[in-house]
Amino acid sequence: MTTISSKTIERFSIYRRLLERYAGERVASGVLAELAGVTAAQVRRDMMALGCMGSSSRGYIAAELRQAIGEYLDAPEGLNIALVGAGELGRSILSYFAGRHKKLRIVAAFDVDPWLTDRKLRGCECYQADKMPEIIAKKNIKLAIIAVPPAAAQQAADVLIKAGVTGILNFSPTALTVPENIFVEYNDITTSLEKVAFFARHIS
Amino acid sequence: MTTISSKTIERFSIYRRLLERYAGERVASGVLAELAGVTAAQVRRDMMALGCMGSSSRGYIAAELRQAIGEYLDAPEGLNIALVGAGELGRSILSYFAGRHKKLRIVAAFDVDPWLTDRKLRGCECYQADKMPEIIAKKNIKLAIIAVPPAAAQQAADVLIKAGVTGILNFSPTALTVPENIFVEYNDITTSLEKVAFFARHIS
DNA sequence: ACATGTGAAGTTATTCACAGCC
DNA sequence: GGCTGTGAATAACTTCACATGT
């Protein structure tokens, strides 16, 4: 497999969701591009990673394409996810995902605050943070979402990785130091907003 | 001004936050790079956009650098922001920003649900959605955060733009169609998580 | 010595443009 | 005619490597 572009993966995620609207139909690269906010050439270039799926002159069959993207992106059995930090942001992420995704399941939440732990939050059991190693092993959790204050993020990551997590989505505004074979994605709300503020002033 | 790189702006936001830890001190590009998770050359290249601030052989003066980044990124008077959609995600964003940022202020929230409106949420007044044009004009709001269900996002954007908003941070998983002179940044939690899932499986 | 500032080189990502197929 | 798949061209971004200043 040739080296995989991070941008292409992001777009697959977007294409896939857009394709849900086109159940039985065909979609041309230009139409998908328009919806996704990219160029038609970009869409076709991305599809090369799937081995290409279009019928000449008739576009892509939406259902086929969606399935192909699914086979490319998803782990067949799905993946179990831990949420670390069940504060407001964490709980809103729980709600956001609750039962929504077929392959990605948040199966445990963790917090240090005893008011939040040892009960269900948004349908998900919330455990004391010191149970992380045990529960992560027992539930075969491979991914984690970190939504704790910045000062606690690195330590949380260390514990998670030791327990077997290999991918982290970090909402905390801290760069994490992790081994080579662990993937970290950052989702920093402040940075996003500062970027909007800058470009809104400098556009045109 | 030479064309501004979106990536550089993101890193400025990160550098600035890291520099807070170094109040009176000096910081070398390599140190900042380590903390930000980039290379030293990258840091120095970014600094060129500021006109360069380092003292040869002694690194950067943290406070000066932070101020220079601030002058580059921030609107001097700051910017007022509207939150559209005061559901769980929206409210967690309110908490996240409440009084935290010196230049970016969420000064109004909007929702269609009467249970949420005409009262304060996390210290921020929440209005009925149909008040958007009026309040946005009155409070001189220039940016908006969209945290509504996907089906409502485009319409919200249309109203916001008509009312004078020029930058949007969109948490809804929908590409927005907007005029050329409006900046939209996407923050799609599902896409972030799918990306983590993919690369966690394919790394190494 | 030591760390910046920066041309030049290298790498990655996107778009062009057109051959080929339906 | 309309749309895909793709080599070639372009643009964007990052790193190298070293001259320069302290």
Image (cartoon, coloured by chain):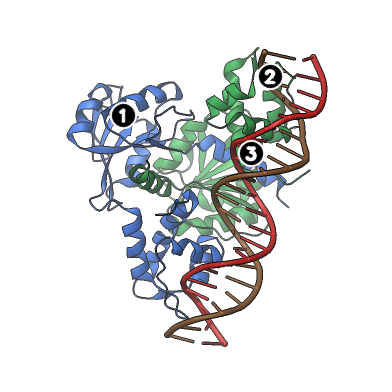
Chain colours: A blue, B green, C brown, D red
Mark nearer the N terminus (2 vs 3): 3
Quadrant holding the N terminus of chain B: top right
The image position of residue B147, as x and y in percent, is 47, 47
Same-chain check, marks 2 and 3: yes
B106 horizontally vs A152: left or right: right
Q: Which residue is mark 1?
A: A160
Q: Which residue is mark 2?
A: B59
Q: Amino acid at mark 1?
A: Leu
C19 horizontally vs A4: left or right: right
Q: Nearer the viewer, mark 1 or mark 2?
A: 2
Between the C-alphas of marks 1 and 3, the distance is: 30 Å
The image position of residue B118, as x and y in percent, is 48, 41
Residue occupying the point 64% across, 57% down: B162
Between the C-alphas of marks 2 and 3, the distance is: 19 Å
Q: Chain of mark 1?
A: A
Residue occupying the point 43% across, 36% down: B92
Q: Determine if residue B104 is in view.
A: no
Q: Amino acid at mark 3?
A: Thr
Between the C-alphas of marks 1 and 2, the distance is: 35 Å
- Residue D11 vertical placement versus B65 (above, below): below
The image position of residue B11, as x and y in percent, is 60, 35
Which element is circle 1 on? helix
Which element is circle 2 on? loop
Report the front residue among A201 and A153: A153
**Image quadrant in which you'd find residue A26:** bottom left
Q: Amino acid at mark 2?
A: Gly
Q: Which mark is residue B165?
A: none
Q: Chain of mark 3?
A: B
Q: Residue furthest left?
A: A138
Q: Which residue is mark 3?
A: B8
- Number of marks drawn: 3
